Image (cartoon, rainbow, N blue to C red):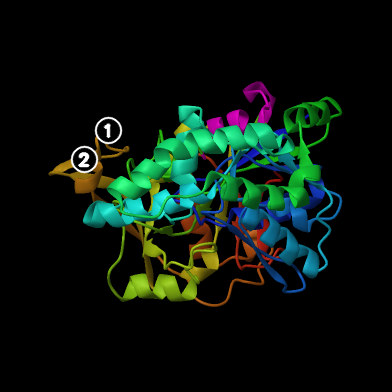
Amino acid sequence: MPAIVLIGAQWGDEGKGKATDLLGEKLQWVVRYQGGNNAGHTVVLPNGDKFALHLIPSGILTPGVNNVIGNGVVVDPGVLLEELGGLEERGVDTSGLMLSADAHLLMPYHVAIDKVTERFLGNNKIGTTGRGIGPCYQDKIARVGVRAADVLDEKILSQKVEAALELKNQILVKIYNRRALDPAQVVDEVMEKAQKFAPRIADTRLLLNQALERDETILLEGSQGTLLDVDHGTYPYVTSSNPTAGGAAVGSGIGPNKITTVLGILKAYTTRVGSGPFPTELFDEWGEYLAKNGGEVGVTTGRARRCGWFDAVIARYATRVNGITDYFLTKLDVLSSMERVPICVAYDVDGERVDDMPMTQTGFHHAKPIYETMPGWWGDISECRTFDDLPANARDYVLRLEELSGAHMSCIGVGPGRDQTIVRREIV
């Protein structure tokens, strides 16, 4: 009864969708366990069709797989319906998608507050996507949130919206000089959309645990990455949930002892979107090279990703925090045709060598990369299908990353397509 966690080991955008899609035919269930429509996955099918997914698990593209939006996700009803409609227009069967009754709904007032707060912060802004994710999680923790099951009882929904807007309208009007929202109008808007997704609401905790009892395989799919975790990331430049492996149990209702494998996704270099420290960030022609050749634009936000060399310090940290058993290394092909490839193996923090993540926010802000450089390789590796097919220097690079990261590089991506993957060790 294997439950597998798929986790980004950097700042997100590592290529988790490709890994989910590769495993798809061996899975019975794929569960999204945290986050919202502030991140996404890109999946390229063998026929070249490209899909950008924001809320819906990547398993939706594999026939016969059951897909669950778990209780740890915050769901914008409009975005959910738009994404479903887009998939159905392209012939994708979405009948197997279920929504946890306990998933919190992202309301119009969450978006309004998110946008005005970021503008108010000015130079101190966090770099949110402005989609209301943080305010929705704030309401969840404050116990004033709206859950998916609430749309099944309009009276309860109305009570919750009225209670929430009693304070939020004061904030919008008196602090930010914005117009107050009408509770009845908000309820009507949500209920209109709810008619279309209410049949998908289910007790997904029960369904998932029953599936494990039947020895079915479940993939727990997070969004973002380890360094964006609200507890374990580069706080305060983080998301508002727990994309780390521990969050998978909480966000799905599956006990942690049911998790047998933690698959970390690493890019062969490093990227991040939004504000915050980034020790290996490049501001020269190599940064432009990685951005251009790697197609480094956010799937959901459309924002350009900041690019830098591979950071083994954060990879080791991700291995430790998540209990990673295997790695999927993506975008190795982007590094082809480079004479030398640097790897950050440690940091210099105020003149002292640091091999692990600095404990303080100040320490990480001051961290400067200490590099070792490996010889590069030439030519197109997109047709390689075994590890031995790779040029010797590419193999050495992968093995060095494996040594520095502390977990086996079980899969290697050599292109965006589903079939452009080298499997060194089977995950399922």
Most foreground residue, 382 or 280: 280
Question: Is any part of residue 58 visible from this angle?
Answer: yes
Left or right, 150 with respect to 294, comes to: right
Picture coordinates of residue 266 (x, y %)? 51, 52
Question: Is any part of residue 374 visible from this angle?
Answer: no
Q: Which residues are magenta?
A: 243-259
- Report the amino acid beneath label 2: Gly
Picture coordinates of residue 422 (x, y %)? 66, 58
Taking the spot 84% from the left edge, 51% from the top edge, the residue there is 95
Q: CA distance from mark 1 to mark 2?
A: 7 Å
Q: Which quadrant of the structure image shows residue 177?
A: bottom left
- Report the amino acid beneath label 1: Met
Residue 327: in magenta span: no
* Residue with the mark numbered 1: 359
Taking the spot 73% from the left edge, 59% from the top edge, the residue there is 84
Q: Which class describes the residues within 10 Å of circle 1: few (<14), some (14-19), or many (20+)?
A: few
Q: Which class describes the residues within 10 Å of circle 2: few (<14), some (14-19), or many (20+)?
A: some
Left or right, 132 with respect to 45, comes to: left
Most foreground residue, 117 or 278: 117
Q: Which secondary structure type mostly characterizes the magenta part of the structure?
A: helix
Q: Are marks 1 and 2 in contact (CB under 8 Å)?
A: yes
Quadrant where the N terminus is found in the figure: top right
Picture coordinates of residue 376 (x, y %)? 43, 68
* Residue with the mark numbered 2: 363
Picture coordinates of residue 57 (x, y %)? 68, 50
Residue 249: in magenta span: yes
Left or right, 83 with respect to 123, comes to: right
Quadrant where the C terminus is found in the figure: top right
**Mark 1, secondary structure of its residue:** loop
Taking the spot 85% from the left edge, 55% from the top edge, the residue there is 63
